[in-house]
Amino acid sequence: MDIGIVGLGLIGASLALDWRRGGHRITGVSRSETTIAIAGERGVIDQGGTAVSLLAGCDVVVLCVPLDRLVPMAAAVCPHLQPDAILTDVGSVKAPLVEAIIPLWSGFIGGHPMAGTAEQGIQAAQSQLFRQRPYVLTPTAQTQPQQLAQLQTLVEELGAQVLLCDPHAHDRAVAWISHLPIWVSAALLGAVRQESDPEMIALAQQLASSGWRDTTRVGGGNPELGVCLAHYNREHLLRGLYQYRRELDRVIAMIEQQDMTALTTYLQKSQRTRTRFEDRHQTREQDNNHI
Ligand code: NAP
């Protein structure tokens, strides 16, 4: 299949790498010539450049640019597509994008791979990033079943688990498990910044280990992405943050009252909640598959 990837950053180049290794022909389009040159050198693409007209012969085009660039990029790409081309994206928010892009291209099927790292750019790309990860597709009433099946097959070739989802339901669910954790983690880092004693900060830095790494990873990621999520999924994110604030108040009250029984019950419930989420998608060790 001829696959066009627009935006050869972490997600775009990682997709390109796996599909190319799977025998597909990859046309890469990105903003900078440097990115295209690196993609060529590292075997990420077969051909590429900065002009969207390069996508004219593609069967499938995947938009992998930052969230706020997806709709303008779709508008720029559509005039060059062949009539039966499938257009999809990887944006972390779906409803506003699907609503804006479907009128531009009825063969648009929203997508969101539930995988990433704290890094960005083509240097961060890695093979098998999507293996054993959920990959959401958001078909609409206009989606042709044959095109959905084609895209689904491509996603499955990545080793990912396809999940068909309503765009609004997707946005509400990812607010809980992805967008809220980013801002909670960022707020944790913000709280630590309030420590005024430099010696205490230095000691804490020396002592920081796996628990700190796990809880701050997503808050210390790509700032552009976090801000876009706050903008495009504002309503669901705020709902989550308000609930989180209420939970923090409950925890503070239990600790102030030294209510060890209530705290134990709370943490027992936390353990059970975490287990229920982990069972769904078996965690895997992050392989070092950087290109
Ligand atoms: P990234 O590593 O920063 O890559 C973004 C790519 O878009 C780069 O190739 C860059 O091109 C290009 N680009 C940036 N600004 C552009 C503009 N104004 N016009 C045209 N191209 C532009 O970002 P990413 O993490 O791959 O994220 C890309 C998309 O994936 C986002 O929509 C995000 O919501 C989604 N996503 C991200 C994650 C994650 O964890 N990171 C997970 C799932 C989905 P140059 O390199 O040529 O400058």
Image (tube, rainbow, N blue to C red):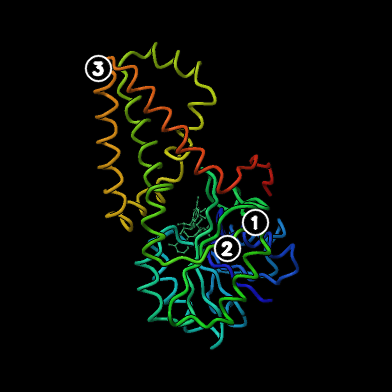
Of the image marks 2 and 3, the number of the one nearer the N terminus: 2
Is 192 placed above or below 9 here?
above
The image shows residue 16 at horizontal and vertical percentages of 64, 62
Give the number of the disc on residue 46. none
Residue bearing mark 2:
162
Residue bearing mark 3:
256
Please name whichever residue, 173 or 14, is drawn nearer the observer in this view of the structure: 173
The CA span between labels 2 and 3 is 46 Å
The CA span between labels 3 and 1 is 55 Å
The image shows residue 150 at horizontal and vertical percentages of 62, 76
Q: Image quarter for residue 73?
A: bottom left
Instruction: Residue at 71% x, 57% y: name it.
Output: 41
Q: Pick out the residue farthest to the top.
A: 199
Of the image marks 3 and 1, the number of the one nearer the N terminus: 1
Label 1 vs label 2, nearer the camera: 2
Residue bearing mark 1:
38
Amino acid carrying mark 3 in the image? Glu
The image shows residue 126 at horizontal and vertical percentages of 65, 50
Instruction: Tell me the SS state at disc 1.
Output: helix
The answer to whether residue 30 is left or right of residue 185 is right
Q: Quadrant of the N terminus?
A: bottom right
Instruction: Tell me the SS state at disc 3.
Output: helix
Is 90 placed above or below 102 here?
above
Q: Image quarter for residue 130?
A: bottom right
Label 1 neighbour load within 10 Å: few <14, some 14-19, many 20+: some
Instruction: Tell me the SS state at disc 2.
Output: strand
Amino acid carrying mark 2 in the image? Val
Label 2 neighbour load within 10 Å: few <14, some 14-19, many 20+: many
Amino acid carrying mark 1 in the image? Ile
Of the image marks 1 and 2, the number of the one nearer the N terminus: 1
Is 96 placed above or below 115 here?
below
- Determine whether the beta carbon of the residue marked 3 sits less than 8 angstroms from the nearest atom of ligand 1: no
